[in-house]
Amino acid sequence: MRIGKGVEWAAHTCALLALLPPGSALAGDALADFLGVPSPYLAKQLQALSRAGIVAAQRGAAGGYWLAQAPESLSLWDVTAAIEGTAPSFRCTEVRRSGPCGASPAECSGPCPIAAAFQRAEADYRRALAAVPLTDVIAGVAREATSARKRRIRDWIQQHAAHRA
């Protein structure tokens, strides 16, 4: 299963937004700069997060983005689904019925074992991501970050965060 870089960027964005003081927002360009990613591409991820109700936005000088939900209520599946969608990754085309040795309709009365295996694996994948709250991800990043990096992040947020009206 391939997960696009937009999911990674969106997860990092949500983790950063979770650190904002109440009533604050970060501009999309500032978020892109913080992550070192192209602003126009991150804007697409922010739009998807906004459509999913994960982030909220305000335009104007005091505008920007902030989490629309508490970080403990958001999971990595929420972020992934917002960016990649919820359509199944595997789509069975009933190949078993094709070709010179294709199965008869009677032989295909039950679900295709290959499709069933992929569906189980995808359900497990989704459950695993849904079991990881954003707060666990943030805690993991915090454990790895040095005190100096944490200070740089805090100072950066203070410099770039706008207070929402």
Image (spheres, rainbow, N blue to C red):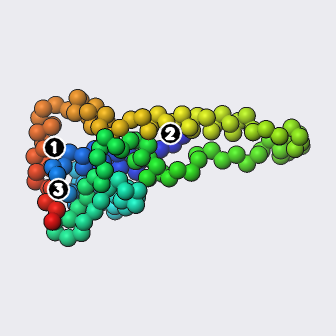
Element at label 2: helix
Q: Is residue 159 toward the left or the right of residue 88 in the image?
A: left
Q: Quadrant of the N terminus?
A: top right
Say the numbered circle drawn on residue 153.
1
Query: In whole angstroms, how far apart are the C-alphas of marks 3 and 2?
Result: 31 Å
Q: Earlier in the sequence, mark 2 or mark 1?
A: 2
Residue 55 in sight in this render: yes
Q: Which residue, as the protein is rendered here, is positioned at the far top?
A: 143
Element at label 1: helix
Disc 1 marks a residue whose amino acid type is Ile
Density class for disc 1 (Cα within 10 Å; few <14, some 14-19, many ≥20) is some
Is mark 2 in CB contact (under 8 Å) with mark 1? Answer: no
Disc 3 marks a residue whose amino acid type is Ser
Query: In whole angstroms, how far apart are the C-alphas of marks 3 and 1?
Result: 15 Å
Disc 2 marks a residue whose amino acid type is Arg
Q: Which residue is mark 2?
A: 126
Q: Earlier in the sequence, mark 3 or mark 2?
A: 3
Write the residue at 47% across / 44% down. 3
Say the numbered circle drawn on residue 24.
3
Q: Is residue 115 toward the left or the right of residue 38 in the image?
A: right
Residue 32, above or below 131: below
